[in-house]
Image (tube, rainbow, N blue to C red):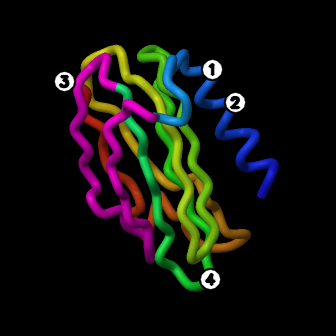
Amino acid sequence: MHNVQSRLLTLVLASGIGTAWGADARVIEVKADSYFFKPDTITVKAGEPVTLSVTNEATFLPHSLVIKAPQAGLDVTIEARAGNTASATFTPTTPGTYEIYCDKEPPFGKSHKERGMHGKLIVE
């Protein structure tokens, strides 16, 4: 657990956020379960600090919420074990539409993303 918290703190610091753990950030709650996110489309404003709070409602499987868009300065990974909530705060700076997905890949079968666990972040 401590390692996950350290990684999230590193993410917050690396993203250039000036607030402590999103004290002034807009909080968006996301549910993760059997191969879906709800909501699967998240719309935010450029320059607006955002905290994504991901609750994994699965009883067994871990899930993640990943946004990788280096061209827009987005490098977000939230790891949520089954039955737990995890969050990350970031400030998107570049308008556009960016993919969100779960990066979990079982040793056999399709990845969570391939099973439908993806969506989009729209930065206006």
Disc 2 marks which residue?
10
Q: Residues within 10 Å of mark 4 (few under 14, many from 20)?
A: few
Q: Residue at x 64, y 68 (%)?
A: 81
Q: Looking at the picture, which amino acid does disc 3 mark?
A: Glu
Q: Looking at the picture, which amino acid does disc 1 mark?
A: Ala
Indicate which label's residue lies in the foreground, 2 or 4. Answer: 2
| Location of residue 106 in the rendering, given as x and y in whole percent from the top left corner | 67, 69
Question: Distance between the Cα atoms at labels 2 and 4?
Answer: 27 Å
**Tag 1–tag 2 contact (CB < 8 Å):** yes
Q: Looking at the image, is 32 positioned above or below residue 28? A: below
Q: Which residues are magenta?
A: 23-48
Task: Identify which residue, 60 or 98, lies in the foreground.
Answer: 60
Q: Residue 117 occupies which quadrant of the picture? A: bottom left
Q: Looking at the image, is 60 positioned above or below residue 28? A: below
| Location of residue 115 in the rendering, given as x and y in whole percent from the top left corner | 44, 67
**Tag 4–tag 1 contact (CB < 8 Å):** no
Q: Earlier in the sequence, mark 4 or mark 1?
A: 1
Q: Residue at x 73, y 69 (%)?
A: 107
Res. 14 mark = 1
Question: Distance between the Cα atoms at labels 3 and 4?
Answer: 36 Å
Extreme residue in the left direction: 124
Q: Residues within 10 Å of mark 1 (few under 14, many from 20)?
A: few
